[in-house]
Image (cartoon, grey):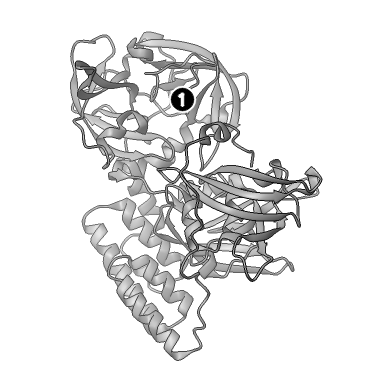
Amino acid sequence: MKTNRLLFALCAGFFSCASIKQPSSVYTHPDYTVEDVRNEEIKRIETLREKDTVQALWRAKLLGDAQTIAACEEAVVAEYKQYLEEKKWYDARRLYQSLAAVQYAGLPSLEKQAAELNALTVADVPGLANTAAKAERRATYISGTVTIWVDRGLKVQNGIGFADRVIGSGFFISKDGYIVTNHHVIEDLVNTRYKGYARLFIKLAGDSDTRIPAKVIGWDPIVDLALIKAEIDAPYVFSLGSSEDLNVGDRIYAIGSPVGLESTLTSGIVSSVDRKLFTVGNVIQIDAAINSGNSGGPCIDENGAVQAIAFAGMLQYEGLNFAIPVEYLKAALPALYSGGKYEHPWMCAFGHTKRDMGKDTGLEVQYVMPGGSLSRAGVQEGDVITAVNGQPVASLEAMQRILFQCSSKVIVTVRARGADGTEKTVLAYLADRPKNPGYRMYNSDILANSFVPIFGMKLVRVSTSSSRKYAVQSIIRGSIADESGFSENDPVDVQGVEFNDDRSVIYLQAYVKNSKKGYLDRSVGMPAPLDSPYYF
């Protein structure tokens, strides 16, 4: 976890006066052997069953009440059958997987089993059934790309009206007009906070005069992907390759409309395959020229197979550009095709790869959010997750790959190793990942604990008369606190905590005496992002 040094420059004068707000209560695991506590949980499960059958089933399994479990299983099966009738295979598969995780006795008698559901889920999804790419003339590849045009009407500045539009790129993945682009290109069309005018069009390569109406099908803000549809016969359809085949130094080609210059092809090499710019996985760094307007265009290999999707370039740094691995697109396409926003799953926890003798041995849980999935399931700080649904988890990256293949609102099995070496397998519910997980954790726990995932340090109260006086109990190596010079046992006087407008950054104001600074009393202003790859 590296400090985002840019935050320090951006935060000066950005936050208002600081304050400290503690949650009114923090979740503690209930004692279900007490009859009243047990009965209250049964009532909560009955209410929950009306809006989320899978979560209700998970809570019933944690409770262990046979009658409640049976009622919840019946509700999930009924919803499963409804999805089958509506041919909503993606949702039906999610319910089947949850029933399998809880070892539902009637699973073999269900109308469709795992293999058939998996096949149906991807059968009609554009892009997943494409044949292998074959080498074509470069002009042929260009014909399969489009310019995305989001018309936002007129913008008035100083009494003068200007055409307001967003320009991006995209590419066909089906003959009947399904197109992949970036979420940030079409964001105004799906952002409920945007109240202005917005219309979506595409322009074909070689025809810059004709604007063809299009519509948004599905979108994924976290991985910056979107699926749109135009009623058109695509002149060329791209095949999806595999970014796992890419190595540093491999040749790659980018096609798009930089600054509106349509049908532009640039080439370069793969500079890196493991940049952590996303919060759910790594992206690819390339040196092929990318500018504003390239966003959403394909990055292809010599045979025209899409290996990645361009999404960002740093204009002030020539040759420093980034692309989304095509594996993310292939994993997201069933959800995007089913329509609406793709909700990524998470377990309400935070951690890093556990390494022993230079070998990755699992995902060390360094924080669990009170009341979250792993907290209720019985996974504790210090446990090491080694498998999810039987798939090995040797590292944080392995967990990210598994979660990317999972839906949210589904039950999974989690195997973990305790600090004493004992193994346990628990049921976890994958909730919708919030936009800023750190903000959710801050509001769910006391300040001293919530600073573990946010700053990488755990505090302990040292005064009964003051709620502001703490000492550092532990530090996560490589964290923001570590890079800022904090050490164990350092006194910390918390003066206030503040957030920026969209709750993506927290700012801590404190007086500290760092041992690394000779215990000199100094004032510290320390910002931190409220999302990172280490939330899972």
Residue drawn at (39%, 22%), measured in percent from left and top?
297
Q: Position of residue 61 (x, y in %)?
A: 45, 75
> Residue under circle 1?
312
**Please, is residue 10 above or below residue 465 in the view?**
above
Q: Position of residue 258 (x, y in %)?
A: 38, 14
Which quarter of the image is occupied by the N terminus? Answer: top right
Check disc 1 and report its element: helix, strand or loop: strand
**Taking the image as drawn, is residue 39 in sight?**
yes
**Please, is residue 220 above or below residue 139 in the view?**
below
Residue 134: name its quadrant: top left
Q: Amino acid at mark 1?
A: Ala
Residue 152: name its quadrant: top left
Q: Position of residue 489 (x, y in %)?
A: 76, 57
Residue drawn at (70%, 69%), measured in percent from left and top?
422
Horizontal side of residue 243 vs 107, given as left or right: right
**Please, is residue 398 above or below residue 368 in the view?**
above
Mark count: 1
Horizontal side of residue 49 vs 62, given as left or right: left
Residue drawn at (54%, 13%), measured in percent from left and top?
318
In front of the other: 496 or 226 = 496
Residue 91: name its quadrant: bottom left
**Taking the image as drawn, is residue 347 in sight?**
no
Residue drawn at (76%, 55%), measured in percent from left and top?
488
Q: Position of residue 369 (x, y in %)?
A: 53, 61
Horizontal side of residue 291 vs 11, given as left or right: left
- Mark 1, Cα crowd under 10 Å, few <14 / some 14-19 / many 20+, is many
Q: Extreme bottom residue here? A: 35
